[in-house]
Amino acid sequence: MKTIKLLGLMMTMAILSSNAIAQNFSKYDEYREVNAFVINKSMFKLMSNLDLESEDEDVKVVMDIVENLDDIKIYTTENIKIGKELQADFNALKAKNNLEELMRVKSDGNDVYFYIKPGKSDDFVKQLLMFVSSTEKNDTQSVLMMINGNIDLKNISKITSQMNIPGGKSLENLKNQ
């Protein structure tokens, strides 16, 4: 009986802590200086139910990926103060969840960081977290992207490149690994 109560308490704490993390990022929805792009599981279900009779291989791959996603959250800002706040929340999330560094890229005046939560196999992850910050004085853009679900790393670059996310092109390197 004690084991069941302890297990229930642990599950409640885990749910509350994951909600607290989500709340940290949802605060950016209220900032005027932040562009927020959030797609949830319901939208992915609608997209996967579309009857797309396309022979385009990219469309088929994207539809397969979308079926296994829980959400995508992207926050962008050009406000330096909010960009630093985004980066602090990014650093807190990766530390709290013990996310593994996937790769770092410094290219075209941007620093791009990718972190993952391992999934069911080496090709899949449960969470992909990306942060992009500009190193150029005249460019102050910061981007935070979080993708949750059953993510196939070999194909995820197709979604990010089609959405034209800064730093998304860096994921192209994953296809060749």
Image (cartoon, rainbow, N blue to C red):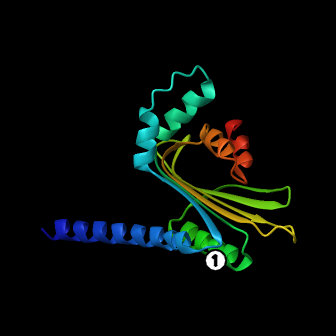
Location of residue 136 in the rendering, given as x and y in whole percent from the top left corner? 86, 67
Above or below 133: residue 40:
above
Return the residue at label 1.
85
The residue nearer to you, when weighing 95 against 18, is 18
Number of marks in the rendered image: 1
Left or right side of 28 for 9: left
Left or right side of 6 for 30: right
Location of residue 12 in the rendering, given as x and y in whole percent from the top left corner? 29, 69
The residue nearer to you, when weighing 63 against 98, is 63
Q: In the orientation shown, which residue stands out farthest toward the bottom?
A: 81
Image quarter where the C terminus lies is top right
Residue sitting at x 85%, y 61% = 109
Above or below 53: residue 49:
below
Above or below 18: residue 58:
above
The residue nearer to you, when weighing 58 against 30, is 30
Location of residue 84 in the rendering, given as x and y in whole percent from the top left corner? 69, 76
Q: In the orientation shown, which residue stands out farthest toward the left?
A: 1
Image-quadrant location for residue 35: bottom right
Residue sitting at x 74%, y 48% = 170
Image quarter where the N terminus lies is bottom left
Left or right side of 105 for 62: left
Query: Label 1 amino acid?
Result: Glu
